[in-house]
Image (cartoon, helix red, strand yellow):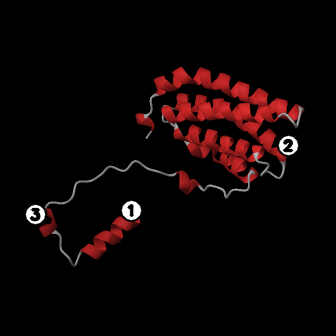
Amino acid sequence: MGDRHDYVALEWVKGEIAETLRLAHQAIEAVLDDPQAFPGLDECLDYIHQVHGSLQMVEFYGAALLAEEMEHLVEALQHERVSHRDEALHLLLQALGQLPIYLDRVQSARRDLPLVVLPLINDLRSARGESLLSETSLFSPQLPELPPLSAEALALLEPAELPNVLRKLRQML
């Protein structure tokens, strides 16, 4: 999975992403300073949406998932579907600060591991009353597609041994 990512493209967009996240951070701080500053939430949503799109474009889906959850929380704040507004805003500030750190880690480790940010993703989901994601929901191994067996290979299989072979294969997985 990690080998198919374009780390050069990530390097190109990382600076722009960091600047856009900084602007989103400023917009949230403005909302914290003045609770009636709804344009700040609109600006923040626009900035995070831009980051989300950039991350999808370069196919770093763990980081894109984090940005998507930030987007959803801002939307929930806009529609007043969050019970603890200030906590949600501070959580957004935390997520805005963590995303560039995560991207640095992705670039240096050459792996996009969403499990690293899963606790933060779940905090964002929890803030808007959504169910939490499990580790298995982020597990998507790249399994090679095996060609079907030829008629000759199928003829060599003993039907009586098939349950034992299947049992062994199940144990291996």
Q: Which numbered disc flags the more N-terminal residue, 1 or 2?
A: 2
Pair 3/1: label in front? 3
Instruction: Give the residue displayed 14% in from the left and 60% down from the top.
Output: 150
Label pair 3/2, CB-CB below 8 angstroms: no
Q: Residues within 10 Å of mark 1 (few under 14, many from 20)?
A: few
Q: CA distance from mark 1 to mark 2?
A: 49 Å
User: Residue at position x 38%, y 67% from top?
Assistant: 170
Height in image: 90 above or below 11? below
**Type of the residue with mark 2:** Asp
Q: Secondary structure at mark 2?
A: helix
Q: Of 44 and 159, which appears nearest the observer?
A: 44
- Give the image quarter of residue 49: top right
Label 1 SS: helix
Q: Which residue occupies the foreground of this view, 142 or 80?
A: 80
The residue furthest left is 152
Residue indicated by mark 3: 152
Q: Which residue is mark 1?
A: 172
Q: Amino acid at mark 3?
A: Glu
Mark 1: amino acid: Met
Residue 142 in the figure: left or right of residue 106:
left
Q: Identify which residue is drawn at 62% across, 55% down.
A: 133
Nearer to the camera, 147 or 15: 15
Query: Which quadrant would the C terminus be assigned to in this image?
Result: bottom left
Residue 32 picture location, percent across and down:
86, 35
User: Callout 2: 10 Å neighbours few (<14), some, many (20+)?
Assistant: some
State the residue position of label 2: 86
How would you rate the neighbour count of disc 3 (Cα within 10 Å): few for under 14, some for 14-19, many for 20 or more? few
